Amino acid sequence: MSGSTLSPSSRARLETLAGAMQGELLLPDHAGWGEASAPWNLAVVQRPAAVALPADVADVQLLMAAARDTGLGVTVQPGGHGPHGGDLHDCILVRTAAFDELTIDIPTRTARVGAGVRWGRVLQALEGTGLLALAGSNPTINVAAFTLGGGHSSFGRSFGLAAHSLLAVEMVTADGRAIRVGDGVGDDDELLWALKGGGGQFGVVTALEFRLHPAPATGRLYGGKLTFPAAAAGPVLRAVLDVAASAPEPLSISAVLMVLPDLPFVPEPLRGQSVVTVDIVSQLDREATESMLEPIRSAGAVVADTVAAFGIGALTDVFAEPVDPVPALEWSALLGSLTHPAVDALVAAFAEGAALGLSLLQIRPLGGAIGRAVTPPAVAGVAGVLAAHALLGATGLVFDPAMVPGIGLALGKVRDAAAPHTVHGRVVTFLAPGEDLGAAYGAPEIARLRAVKARVDPGGTIRSNRPLPLA
Ligand SMILES: Cc1cc2nc3c(=O)[nH]c(=O)nc-3n(C[C@H](O)[C@H](O)[C@H](O)COP(=O)(O)OP(=O)(O)OC[C@H]3O[C@@H](n4cnc5c(N)ncnc54)[C@H](O)[C@@H]3O)c2cc1C
């Protein structure tokens, strides 16, 4: 049940709001509260004052007025893969599922999506269009949440971070105005810059438009997952890094060391096993891709192989990630370099960490358009360009609360092994609960973001999961 400390007058005001909205407003004693208020990452406990499911822009405006009257904050959480870390007791939690519009415009190579749309639906809609979008690895991730946080895609080496392709944003500001940013007409360039990677702290976004990119002429991609026993982790990871270092931009390779959970979404023979997997997404044809994969294939005995031609609609099948909520503790970093001895140190840290409850260690090599200067630089937004070599992430699935201290120690082992190679900066979507934007950006960017925040939300009504650092 709730830890809400709502005063009687605030509760009365929220009940008035509930009556005025076309959509729904749930309070902690309402049926369905537990599911409605929980994030996707079930390790984070949230006790918001209310959960709002607005039906339209007018509902969002009504809820902003109620937030002003009650002094409550407003925090948007379409799914909760990246929850806040705080308990949100003084916030109205907004779910955007009703904002479900989706338009793909093939001639202009653009898409318009409502703030409730998830990547899986966009990818299905792109099938057969000859176009690609900068989607992530999981179909359940919300397009707006992902893009506002920078957004790392397998197509990033060709086309940059998702935020770089963001063209326009429609949102409701804390003072209740419905505005559009983008198109260059009467524009607030500084706000658009901040929205491209500054996260969800400038208003409630209701829709966004972004650039799509050309698929290969055949309309088909090539790739999948190669799975090796964990004993081959060292040679496989070294081969992945070597191949990624010289690969052309249309080839994206990432690697995951993991203890596969004993759960139904894992194929039967692999449940509970330790493995290393290599995820491949290539815009090149089979022959060109396979010739580059050869050093990886020969680095160990392949025990499962899903590599084949596929259409954009099946992109996230490559990664085969869980789609149902799970409890997880996470840590991530950007690596400036990754030598073979460093890989060996990470493999050793994972092995030690796995004994303590660590589930997964992921390396996503970057490069290409992710690190290449954009002209004009404002197009890249605050997300900017990342000169780093790779993104490193570690996750422990918390099947039992007693696992938390062990996973904490395990994440520390990975952090220590990575420390000599980490550089400042992060893709905001990979920040962990409790981290702020100071972990992603430098002092000049934080100062610019603060100036935008002070202008568009002077009262601090909109609470982001990844807030600005305290001044
Ligand atoms: C299995 C898994 C795979 C992932 N894969 C990737 C990947 O490939 N690439 C990547 O970059 N990241 C990835 N992530 C990281 C990241 O958690 C998500 O990209 C991101 O947090 C979106 O998750 P979500 O859709 O649940 O949004 P939420 O976690 O619900 O939202 C995140 C934040 O976005 C802001 N926000 C969302 N919608 C709005 C809105 N309408 N208006 C204003 N603010 C808003 C809010 O501040 C909110 O707290 C992954 C995470 C997991 C667990």
Image: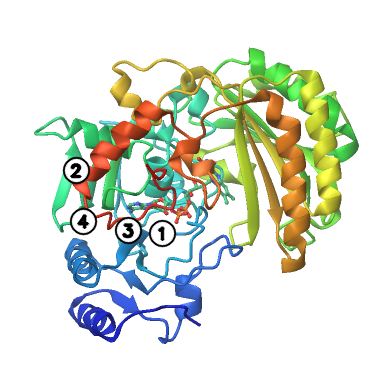
Mark linked to residue 418: none
Mark linked to residue 455: 2
Q: Label 2: state its secondary structure.
A: helix
Check mark 1 vs ligand 1: CB closer than 8 Å? yes or no: yes
Residue 343 to residue 70: above or below: above
* Mark found first going from the N terminus, 2 or 3: 3
Give the image location of residue 178, x and y in percent. Answer: 15, 53
Q: Nearer the viewer, residue 229 or 416?
A: 416
* Mark found first going from the N terminus, 3 or 4: 3
Residue at 40% across, 31% down: 383
* Mark found first going from the N terminus, 1 or 4: 1
The residue under label 1 is which amino acid type? Gln
Q: Quadrant of residue 362?
A: top right
**Residue marked by disc 4:** 174
**Residue marked by disc 1:** 77
Marks 3/4 in contact by CB < 8 Å: the verdict is: no
Q: Nearer the viewer, residue 171 or 402?
A: 402
> How many neighbours does mark 2 have within 10 angstroms: few (below 14), some (14-19), or many (20 or more)?
few
